[in-house]
Image (cartoon, rainbow, N blue to C red):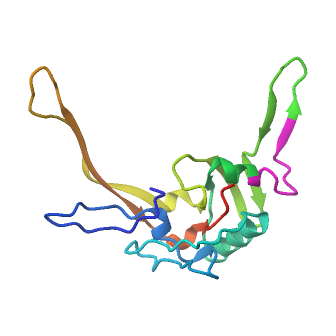
Amino acid sequence: MFANNAKVAGNATTAREMAGAPSWMKTNVDFQSGNSGANPTGDGTDARTDDGTATAFSQTKFDTVMQSIWENGGNPDTVYLSAFQMNVALGFTGNNNQRSAVQAGDERVVKSLAVYVTPWGTVEFMPSRENRSRDVFIMQDDMWEVATLRPTKNIELAKTGDSTKRQVVTELTLCAKNEAANGIIADNTTS
């Protein structure tokens, strides 16, 4: 879903491929355009072009994209980001929702960022292992849908000796209902 992948219609010799979220996002974007970075056309037919010179994810970039989403009518609710970028977000200033405390009688240290409040909306930060570390997605979840073309089936294949083989088959795609309700901060450093 988060792969920087363009859709492929497929044919008798080529498998169909789903367009990932980055290939839909062109309106509310912060990326490096100085060298080779470029937005996709926004219809899933091409992937975004990564820039070779990444820059650090920052609160300024985040707030700028949040404002752009708001100005375009979006109401984002979830931010999907890698563990590395989550650690950057934990350092945002003015973050009243960050907790760093040791509980009396408890040996746990709690440090988390659950909700971030901006003038442009309130979002939940969700660390994700699925998206690339260089990308931070600000999403309005109800503006995305996974459409099932062929439901998941577990099919038994021909038996070979004592070996039992099965295959799991499904066809689905990602539908962007309104790309302008979402944003991406791309080309971030990952270390």
Residue 179 placement, left or right of 16: right
| Front position in the image: 49 or 70 | 49
Q: Quadrant of the N terminus?
A: bottom left
Asked if residue 91 lies in the magenta stretch, the reply is: yes
Asked if residue 101 lies in the magenta stretch, the reply is: no
Tell me which corner region of the image, top left, top right, bottom left or bottom right, holds residue 155. Answer: top left
Tell me which corner region of the image, top left, top right, bottom left or bottom right, holds residue 27. Answer: bottom right
Give the overall secondary structure of the magenta segment: loop
Q: Residue at x 13, y 20 (%)?
A: 162
Q: Residue at x 9, y 32 (%)?
A: 158
Q: Residue at x 57, y 77 (%)?
A: 37
Q: Residue at x 83, y 21 (%)?
A: 107
Q: Quadrant of the C terminus?
A: bottom right
- View extreme (top): residue: 105
Residue 111 at what x, y percent from top left? 79, 38
| Front position in the image: 4 or 97 | 4
- View extreme (right): residue: 104
| Front position in the image: 60 or 177 | 60
The magenta segment is 88-100
Residue 121 placement, left or right of 47: right
- View extreme (bottom): residue: 34
Residue 94 at what x, y percent from top left? 88, 57
Residue 117 placement, left or right of 24: right
Residue 130 at what x, y percent from top left? 51, 49
Give above or below for 31 relative to 148: below
Give above or below for 163 relative to 96: above
- Total labels drawn: 0
Residue 183 at what x, y percent from top left? 59, 68
